[in-house]
Structure formats: structure tokens, C-alpha cells
Amino acid sequence: MAVTVKTFASASEAAGALSLDRTARYLGGGTLVMRALNEGDVSISTVVRAQDQALTRIDASGPRITLGAGVTFARVLAERDLAFLHAPARSIGGPAVRNMGTVGGNLFAPNPYGDFTVALLALDATVAVQGGFGSRDIPIEEFLQARERQAGTLVLSVSCTRPASSETFRYRKIARIKPKGGSVITLAAHLPISGGRIAGARIALGSMAPTQIRARAAERALEGRSLDAATIAVAASAATEGTSPSDNALGSAWYRREIVGVHLRRLLSGQD
Amino acid sequence: MSKIPLQFRHNGRDVAIFVDGGTNLLVALRELIGDMTPKFGCGQGGCGTCGVLIDGELHLSCLTLAESVAGRSVETLDGMKQGPNLHPLQRAFADNFAAQCGYCTPGMLMAAKALLDRNPSPSRDEVIEAISGNICRCTGYEPIINAILAAAGGRVSA
């Protein structure tokens, strides 16, 4: 079925069009919306696009980095200043998908996708969105909780603070097919250290709930402690708390609950 | 609903077509231009057989909105051979038995071309990474990897 495609020069015009027509879908890299059209999704009657350079801008020079929503994973990988995001970017798709898929689109990618968003959730990113009445910044956790109600708004960019070192930010994706494949589970941990102790731990999980979630019980187990074997064991045993994984072709809910603690322990221990 | 006029470069030649809103590039190439070399596989981004180069970058044509290539250059397998001569990658695929049923071959060749265009002497791992978005159910990948390395003048394992 033919759909109406509306292309705008600016992101704000596109956001205006989305706010006026809540059934319209924004087309970024195409890996979600074109797929839905190929599958005959008749709920999409209007597709909105924007050819705004601001959406593809990368600001990675300072301590706080900002990625335009239209930045592709290939561009993240080409940016030396974004080395801390290379592991999550590389874990997505093959080269063609990384040339197309975008940071903004990944926020909407359902399980078993959305791995980059797991990293952004652990990094406490901020999502800049524009609705009909201007733009605002939303903490990524709040954004994800309301993801299904984001119709009518356009994601402009995401930003986060650069982790202090490669040790303080860790990422792990478990897939059945290497080097690419959908996620069985995905884990990311941000472990800022202050005076030898963890201060402000954030652990994010993918494919453990309908959207990416934080493992708050595991975070509490780490907070204020040093990253030793006993602390890691307590955090790992708390990894399933608050999760609600589903069965899919890549793994059962039971299997995901069984392995999430094992992989969190390996991630925190620095094991491969 | 009215058709949308679309112009782009297809294998070095300017083409002009009319597409329906929402038409993907794969349908435009196969049904409107008659270039049957990119194949329809999964329609989801999982198989890679619809791979084409857009301004030299590997993209999946089935997930590309046709009108997004307006004014851009699209290369498909149909443009790979040079006159009557096969491209070195095509020759290497034939010599190394890298095509069996042949369905994945167009995407494999385009992914390999995207690699060799920017990295003329890749390592084996780089070749594996370059075709990691392409599924082959016949060959077990080894002959394909060897063919790409052979075309690059690299080492070919027995």
C-alpha cells in the first residue's frame, strides 16, 4: 500500500508534522520503519523525514558528548573520540545495518535489538525531543518508560558524560551468532570510582524486560563498595530482581534469568 | 495517490522513474529499472542479499526508501563487470567455488566490493566482519572468505 512521504528541510518542521498527525512515523535510517512497511504494516499511512544537518552532528570534543539522532553506528565507529561507544556500536548488525541504523532509531528498537540504548542507559544519557511546542530534555530512563507514548515527538539528539576511563564503562552483548546477531541479553555497567569505592553505579540490561531497564538491586549492591569478588557476587545474585524477560527464538525467559547473573559477574570481574 | 518523480545515477547512468510513496529501493531497481541483480531475501535487514552501494557505502536496498537516493549514485552487481570481463571479485568467486545456489552472491559481492574499495588488502578477520551481515546457507562461508582474499591478492588458506 502506498504511503504519503513528507520530507522537510528542518527538524522543527518535521516535529511539527509529527505532532499534528500522531499516526505518522518518523523515518530515520530505515531499519525499523521500512521493515514495518515491507511487512505490510497498514498502521503506517504517513512517513515523515527531515534532511536537517543538525540531526547528523557529532559533538565529541568535550567531557559531555552529543550525538544527533541521525548519526549512524558507522559514524560512531569512525570517531576516535567516541571509543567508549565503539563496543556497543560494533555489536549491532553487519556493515550495511551500521551504515543505516541511527542512534535515535535505536531508542525505539524492540527486543532483541536496541543494544546501543543499553549503553546509553548505563551512561545516564539525556534525550532531547521536540514536540509541537518546542524542545525539552528527558532522562533516558524516563524516555524509555514512556516510549510507547512518544508519538507526536521527534528525537533530536542524545547526550551523555564521557566515562572517566575504559575501566569505568563496560559493555557485553550475548548473541548466538558471531560477530552479529540479535541479543540474548545485553549488559552495560558504568562504575565511577571515588576514593577506591564505587559512587553512582548504573547497570543497564537489554532483553530482560519489554524495554531496556536498570538493574537497581545490583546497583545497590555495588554502591559505596570496592569492586571485589564478594561485592561482585552479591551484585550478580541480585541481577534478576525487577526483570521480566520474554521467550523468543533466541532464548527463553528462564534461560535469560539463568545467565544474566553469570554475565554480570563476568562483566564486573573484567573477564571476557 | 500521485507518483513521485525520482532521478539518480544507476551504475554510472542517469535514470528517471516514478515511484509510489513508500516504495523501497529494491523494488524500484528490480521492477521499475529492470536491474534484477539485487535480490529480495528477508525484507528485514537480516540477510544482506539486497545490498547495494549508495555513494560508495554499503546499504540494504530493501530498507532504503527509494526517494532518499534522489541525486545520489547507486551501484549494483549489474554494474560490476567491465564490459565482457568479469570483475576480479566475480572471477575469484567462480575460481574458488564461492557461489553455490547463488542467492546470496549479489549481496556478498557488493559487501566485498565495499570492503576492497576502502581496504584493498584486508585481513581474514576484516573479510569475515565485512560479510557478517550476509547470510549464506550453502557454502559455509569459507569459499567466500577465500575468494575475497584471493581477489585482494591476499593469502588463501587450503
Image (cartoon, coloured by chain):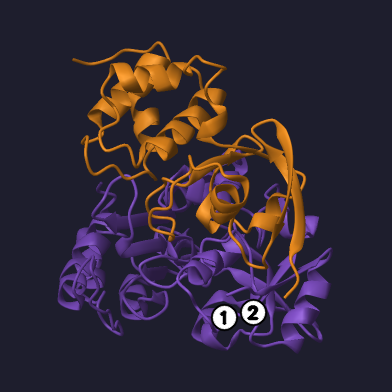
Chain colours: A purple, B orange
Q: How crowded is mark 1: few (under 14 residues within 10 Å), some or many (20 or more)?
A: some
Q: How crowded is mark 2: few (under 14 residues within 10 Å), some or many (20 or more)?
A: some
| Res A164 seen here | no
Do the dots labelled 2 and 1 sit on one chain? yes
Q: Which amino acid, by three-letter code, is at mark 2?
A: Ile
Front residue (pair A139, A16): A16
Q: Does dot 2 land on a helix, a strand or a loop? A: strand
In the rendered view, does A211 fall on the left or right side of A55? left
| Res A42 seen here | yes
Q: Where is residue A221 in the image (x, y as percent from the top left)?
A: 30, 75
- Relative vertical location of residue A153 with respect to residue B121 in this rendering, above or below: below
Q: Which amino acid, by three-letter code, is at mark 1?
A: Phe
Q: Residue B135 carries which label?
A: none
- Relative vertical location of residue B131 with respect to residue B28 in this rendering, above or below: above
Chain of the residue under label 2 = A
Chain of the residue under label 1 = A
**CA separation, marks 2 and 1?**
6 Å
Residue placed under numbered mark 2 in the picture: A138
Q: Which quadrant of the figure contains the N terminus of chain A?
A: bottom right
Residue placed under numbered mark 1 in the picture: A143
Cβ atoms under marks 2 and 1 closer than 8 Å: yes
- Relative vertical location of residue A198 with respect to residue A218 in this rendering, above or below: above
- Relative vertical location of residue B1 with respect to residue B38 in this rendering, above or below: below
- Residue A7, quarter of the rendered image: bottom right
Q: Position of residue A195 (x, y in %)?
A: 45, 59
